Amino acid sequence: MTGHPANGLDDTVHQRVRLGILTIAHEARRVEFSYLRNNLELTAGNLSQHLGVLECGDRS
Amino acid sequence: MTTEAAYPGDDPNRLLSNARELAQRVRKDQRGTWFPLLVFALLTFVSIPVRRYSGHHLDCLAVPRVCTVYSDAEFVYWPIALVLAYVAIAAFYIRRSRARGVGTRVRPYAIAGIIIAVALTGVALWEVHHPPADPMGLSGLALQLARPEAAIGLALLVLAWTERNRALLLLTLAYLPAVLMPITFGWVQPNPPWYFYPAVFQGSVLLLGGIGFALAQRPLRSPPP
């Protein structure tokens, strides 16, 4: 039994910005860093950090 | 490993709505619908003089008593023009995709377009030697389907699907019946006076559609401030 559906949320992918990154990547399949940065209104450093989290999540 | 949880203030509904909005924005950025429409409008208009001044052939069968009129343009101009058009469209989408930094799904459209064009040209060639007994009936529909204008319409359906573009789907659903409707006035001659009316109408639909999409997509092309 998993309890409340919210317990099934994974912070790695369901965090607001990272969900945005994955949504864009799913639609486009190939997307450049600058496109993500502009559309998600992030700084380059912030975006790199989120991409790093997704990359780590993918490895684990 | 992540150190931050999902924003506690974020409403899940708003999160999903933002994701949907983002997906819509990406789809709009991927679209370049006006270009294929304008290319096909141009090809349709150019086909008028090509058909007028190219050679014509008249084949008649005794049983059933059916005559088929066809021009060289149908088997030379259109197959070459369609293949070149799909190459140009694919190049346009790829260049645009690189400029915007977001990938597009033009490959299925270009491949489907070329396959449909080649297949329908083959069907049209076959029908020249095996004309339908009743050109105004159901068998005539196959004759109309084998026309290059129908090939353009069928491929536009694929483009509407790959771009998830409802407006293009509606335009194509209006264009296809106009192409599939057999237009004849009952006499047979290589160049009847009305021969260019269907092409003008079909080209105009594509041209107006292309202009409409170009205007609709224009604000998206301007760089962000």
Image (tube, rainbow, N blue to C red):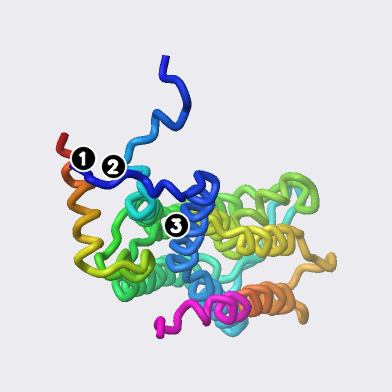
Label 3 in the same subunit as label 2: no
Pinpoint residue B28: horizontal percent, then vertical percent.
49, 66
Residue B137 rendering spot, x and y as whole percentages:
79, 48
Labels 1, 3: front one? 1
Q: Quadrant of residue B214?
A: bottom right
Return the disc, 1 or 2, that comes first in the chain's sequence.
2
Is B76 above or below relative to B13?
below
Mark 1 is surrounded, within 10 Å at the Cα level, by few (under 14), some (14 to 19) or many (20 or more) other residues, namely some
Whether B220 is among the magenta residues is yes
The amino acid beneath tag 2 is Thr
Residue B121 seen: no
Position of A54 with respect to B174 (left or right) is left
Rounded to the nearest angstrom, the CA distance separating label 3 from label 2 is 35 Å
SS under mark 3: helix
Q: Nearer the viewer, residue A21 or A43?
A: A43
Residue bearing the label numbered 3: B109
Majority SS type along the magenta span: helix
Residue B213 forms part of the magenta stretch: yes
Check disc 1 and give the amino acid type.
Gly
Secondary element under disc 1, as helix, strand or loop, is helix
Q: Quadrant of the N terminus of chain B?
A: top left
Q: Are marks 1 and 2 in contact (CB under 8 Å)?
A: yes
The foreground one among B144 and B223 is B223
Seen at 22% across and 45% down, the residue is B3
Residue at image point 60% right, 73% down = B56
Q: Quadrant of residue B96?
A: bottom left
Q: Are marks 1 and 3 on the same chain?
A: no
Question: In this rendering, would A60 be left or right of B14?
Answer: left
Q: Residue tagged by mark 2?
A: A12
Q: Is residue A38 left or right of residue B151?
A: left
- Identity of the residue furthest to the top in this view: A1
